[in-house]
Amino acid sequence: MKVALIGASGQAGSRILAELIGRGHQVTAIARNPHRIVSGAAVTAVKGDVSDRAALTALLKGHDAVVSSVRFSSSDPLILIEAVRASGVKRYLVVGGAGSLEAAPGVKLIDTPHFPEAYKPEASKGGKFLDLLRQTQDLEWTFLSPSALFVAGERTGQFRLGDDQLLSNDTGSRISFEDYAIALVDELEKPAHIRRRFTVGY
């Protein structure tokens, strides 16, 4: 596929880029600092501004899918969604957050007593992004939430998928950027969560 990846130089974005390349996809890697991305036969690195809807729309046109991996606190979901819509691309995958997942029935992780205050602004905006997507019927969107700890690690291919409930095991709730990237590109290649949120964890 031809995939436009917004935020391709970030922690999650760079792993998603590597996973896409490894599976033979052609990627337009969009970043504020494209010099950090190594261009090649499968990658075209371009400078993009997530606050400029018209310019972003132009970059997205002609792709089979768009993946956005950008901080919620430094972007506007309306601009992102409208740019995808205006580009004519129907498939839109979003690197989500864990804060909106249920830690217990009816209780979101962000509302639990031990959720770090420093992460609440980002998590809150992630939840609002998901709410906005849930009102969007003209795009084939998917919002993939990581586990509570989203960290650098290994590409093991051994993980579980869930829906709206936080996944955890006896060592806590965690997923590596590398295994998250596998789950996201799996969803891109074989869609199973159209207009739905799902999650990945160990």
Image (cartoon, rainbow, N blue to C red):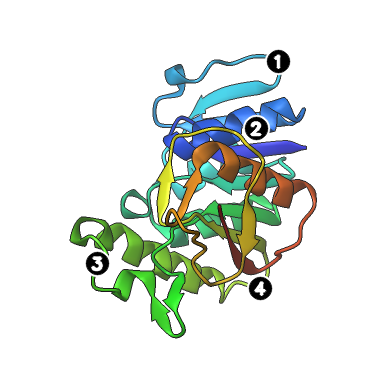
Residue 41, disc: 1
Q: Secondary structure at mark 2?
A: helix
Closer to viewer: mark 4 or mark 2: 2
Q: Which residue is mark 3?
A: 114
Residue 172 occupies which quadrant of the picture? bottom left
What residue is shown at x 52% (from left), y 26% (from top)? 46
Instruction: State how far apart marks 4 and 2 are (Cα).
Output: 28 Å
One can see residue 50 in this view = no
Where residue 92 appears, x then y in whole percent?
63, 54
Q: Which residue is mark 2?
A: 19
Residue 38 occupies which quadrant of the picture? top right
Q: Secondary structure at mark 3?
A: loop
Mark 1 vs 4, N-terminal side: 1
Residue type indicated by callout 4: Gln
Q: Secondary structure at mark 1?
A: loop
Residue 137, disc: 4
Closer to viewer: mark 1 or mark 3: 3
Circles 3 and 4 in contact, beta carbons < 8 Å: no
Mark 2 vs 1, N-terminal side: 2
Residue type indicated by callout 1: Ala
Circles 2 and 1 in contact, beta carbons < 8 Å: no
Q: Is residue 13 above or below residue 118?
A: above
Mark 4 vs 2, N-terminal side: 2
Instruction: State how far apart marks 1 and 4 are (Cα).
Output: 35 Å
Where residue 126 appears, x then y in whole percent?
40, 62
What residue is shown at x 34% (from left), y 62% (from top)? 123
Disc tally is 4
